[in-house]
Amino acid sequence: MGDLHTLRRKTVNVVMLTITGLCTLFAAGTLVFILGYLFVHGGSSLTLDFFTKLPTPVGEPGGGMANAIVGSAKLLALAMVVGVPLGFLGGVYLAEFGGSTFSFVIRYVTDLLNGVPSIVIGIFAYTLIVLPQKHFSTLAGGLALGVMMIPIAVRSSEEFLRTIPNSLREGAMALGASKAKSILTVVIPAAKNGIMTGIMLNLARVAGETAPLLFTSFGNRFWSPGWEQPTSALPVMIFTYAISPYEDWHRQAWSAGFVLLTLVLAVNIFARAVLAKKKHVAR
Amino acid sequence: MAASSSTVPSAGPSRAAPNFWERLRGGDEAAYVLTFIAAASILLITGMLVYELFINSADARAKFGWAFLFTQTWDPVNDQFGALPFIYGTLVTSFLALLMGIPLGVGAAIFLAELAPPKISDALTFLIELLAAVPSVIYGLLGIFVLVPILRLVEPSLRAVLGWTPFFSGPFYGVSLFSAGVVLAVMIIPFIISISREVILAVPGDQREAALALGATRWETTWDVVVPFAKKGIMGSIFLALARALGETMAVTMVVGNDPKIKASLFAPGYSIAAVIANEFTEATGKLYTSALIELGLVLFALTIVINGVARLLVMGTDKYKT
């Protein structure tokens, strides 16, 4: 009787532990599968034209997504201008000046803003820029992505500033530096690498965002000079091409997916290698 | 103090208390004000977000009132808008995602935190966290061209087992609420794993040792001692995952089928709040149509804010366990 009980417990032990192992295998296997599939399908159909040519009219094979690549780069540049200074300064406030109820509120609201679905951020940018201007623009898309960058910029800047030991701050102040001077010349330079990597991860995240661009930067089959016209972007192209009925467009969607994923994962792997010592990464 | 300081020659009146302008020149006030403004502007932006959603949905709110949430008709031609099919689709797909994602995610988190050797655990966690970085449009792409064909193959056997329930009846076209649920599950698993793993790792070692010393097996220690200890944080990770699933747009739009009807069958195409906004916003003609879509955005916003608020409080509550 007792033996049977022990046997049952041992069996449960082995079975359940195996199941958790299988769960892990499934999760990790998914990534391998995604990478493998994209690599085979996307990588093989990638041509030089993809990077240098404009999309061709419907039905005409060939062409590329040069305008979408440039469009994405412009959108990301705008997003950085909007999101990084605000987020970084906010992070400095929380790490160096905060400590009260107000900081708690800021942190909480920042986390909530981070959780707002990207499509809702898109509506926000639409009401702010597209609605008054009555046309889609690169500007609106950049603003949407910029707003998306703010919460993570705040939290990652704060976290990296906090990893700097207080003795550095005290040392600077003991030498007669004001608080501002110690932050500017000692604390921020010490945390610089972390903060920069945080920004890169942040950029990689918004680079793949599609939903907030659908009705802000909209899309464009041609070049989009300046900042006031609708522009194409890689993730939006993937979406449009994937749901189209054309075989050739599907192929190009795979190529675009391959390029986008390679970029995003490369940044992530690089960033995590740099941050290997630090355990926590804000997301 | 006043007596002793009076004997020392004073360096001048300005030593006593530097006024605001002097501190400003020293940079402290400037740095404080500047960073304070940046921090406060986050509140301002969030406030503006709510305000814009509210103001721009005024037409729809005035016309339909609360009935907007409970009616099923979505007829842009006749200006009749009810959000129920979308709310239903959003909840069903997210629920399906949790149903599949929680066991897999928590199971893997347990394995990574409790069983795997640290090196293997770190390597696998690294891989899994990369999954969280994959853009949602890529999940959608794989959903359309890989998952849907796979589900078409699996469908007959699923139907053979569960076909007697209303949930797996009716024709299956590949794109459906079920497909969206599967894609969402794959997308939220990394979040559940990485947060749950950290929470489980933060459980003090003596809890495990005590249970093992009492003769519990490895699994009993994990399931009856460690997991209950980390329960709050695991719940937090699940709520975070839920919020993400509710607001997920592109992957769902691409596989859910985009049909605004409420059907019991999970094999039927459906629609979600985020998906209808993504699909119809640029085509919306007329103020009421746009306004109704923005109100849907407001509903989605409210839904995710509540879930996120709970999740953050739960995860925050576990911070005190960490050293």
Image (tube, coloured by chain):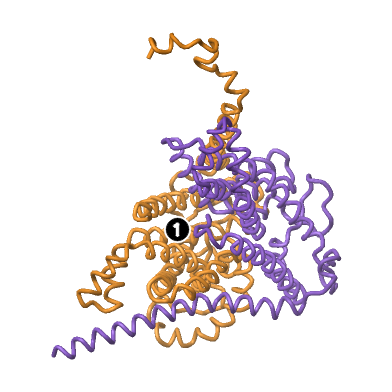
Chain colours: A purple, B orange
Q: Is residue B289 visible?
A: no
Q: Where on the picture, by quarter, is residue A184?
A: top right
Q: Rate crowding at label 1 as few (under 14), some (14 to 19) or many (20 or more) other CA atoms within 10 Å.
A: many
Q: Which residue is mark 1?
A: B240
Q: Is residue B144 visible?
A: yes
| Residue at 69% from the left image edge and 62% from the top image edge | A235
Give how far across and how far down residue A140 sits, in percent: 70, 46
**The residue under label 1 is which amino acid type?**
Leu
Q: Is residue A122 above or below residue B106?
A: above
| Residue at 79% from the left image edge and 48% from the top image edge | A229
Q: Which is nearer the eye, B201 or B14?
A: B14
Q: Is residue B157 above or below residue B214?
A: below
Q: Is residue A261 above or below residue B31?
A: below
Under circle 1, the secondary element is: helix
Q: Chain of mark 1?
A: B
Q: Where on the picture, by quarter, is residue B71?
A: bottom left
- For residue B234, side relative to residue A177 (left or right): left
Image quadrant holding the N terminus of chain A, namely bottom left
Give how far across and how far down residue A25 sits, in percent: 48, 79
Give how far across and how far down residue A237 sits, in percent: 72, 63
Q: Which is nearer the eye, A28 or B170?
A: A28
Q: Where on the picture, by quarter, is residue A56?
A: bottom right
- For residue A154, side relative to residue B316 (left or right): right
- For residue B199, side relative to residue A53 (left or right): left
| Residue at 46% from the left image edge and 68% from the top image edge | B97
Q: How many marks?
A: 1
Give how far across and how far down residue A116 sits, in percent: 52, 51
